[in-house]
Image: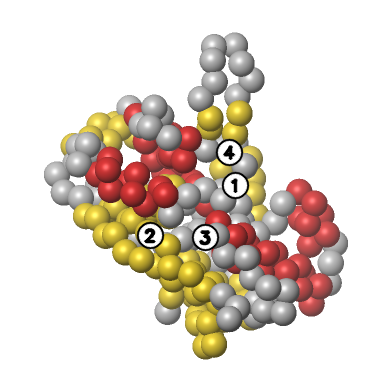
Amino acid sequence: MTQTSTNIPLTTITFPEIPLRVRDGHKLRGYFGNVFKEHSPLLHNHFETEAGETPRYRYAYPLVQYKVLGSVPTLVGLGEAAALLVELFLKINHLDIEGRGFPVLSKNITHQQATIGLSDDLHTYRFETLWLGLNQKNYAEYRDATPDAQQAILKRTLTANILTVCEAAGLNLPREQRIMVKLTPTEPIVTNFKNAKLLGFGGTFTSNALIPNSLGLGKSVARGFGSVVGI
């Protein structure tokens, strides 16, 4: 029987008493990546190198994602990173964001087996944070395209993003299994990120894909972009 979905560990840690801005997601990544850098490259997508060596990066879907959802700092760990976050949970008692210290007075953790893959039913999702669906190559294509062609580019990109998540979960979908997507994006929104202007989208989409809440799609998901929630 062809496998079209799989269960994978998912851990979510939240800090409900520390209000941050959405754009602080990458600062969370910087802080935790530095504090726990000796534990695993999963935390910051960098492999350890000796002094003077060229930095080496983990070019894969980020299994640990740092984001701010509804003003709440949130860490999401998938697969092997889920167990890592559980291990580190008790050690987190302080946050430092750009020199501002925040004592951790309360924190919540959920650990579950989440389902990723394809379903016989359709599901609707909302982007809780901006989805960065364009890279340098398809941005130029998108900019010069007709409205219908722009929609097709975004749909194609979102389909590829969903496939990336499935592959990160260890699921290799057979060619005959089709990811269906109907996307209703917002108008493009320009966002400033690390001194660069990026084009992002909000909105909703409907798909036969199963995507756990708070997981990210698209570019820069480790820094909180593209987080989805089922509606």
Between 153 and 197, the one lying in front of the other is: 153
The secondary element bearing badge 4 is classed as loop
Amino acid type, callout 2 = Pro
| Badge 2 vs badge 4, beta-carbon distance below 8 Å | no
Q: Is the C terminus in the top left, top right, bottom left or bottom right quadrant?
A: bottom left
Residue 57: x and y in percent read 59, 34
Against 180, residue 76 (above or below) is: above
Against 15, residue 164 (above or below) is: below
Residue at (73% x, 69% y) in the render: 156
Q: Residues within 10 Å of mark 2 (few under 14, many from 20)?
A: some
Amino acid type, callout 1 = Ala
In the drawing, does residue 208 fall left or right of residue 145? left
Q: Alpha carbon of mark 3 to alpha carbon of mark 2: how far?
A: 9 Å
Q: Which mark is residue 9?
A: 2
Q: Residues within 10 Å of mark 4 (few under 14, many from 20)?
A: few
Residue at (30% x, 32% y) in the render: 96
| Residue bearing the label numbered 3 | 169
Q: Is residue 169 visible?
A: yes
Q: Give the foreground label among 2 and 1.
A: 2
Residue 115: x and y in percent read 44, 71
| Residue bearing the label numbered 4 | 58
Q: Alpha carbon of mark 4 to alpha carbon of mark 1: how far?
A: 6 Å
| Residue at the bottom extreme, as displayed | 121
Q: Alpha carbon of mark 2 to alpha carbon of mark 1: how far?
A: 18 Å
Q: Give the foreground label among 1 and 3.
A: 3
Amino acid type, callout 4 = Arg
Against 210, residue 70 (above or below) is: above
Q: Is residue 73 visible?
A: no
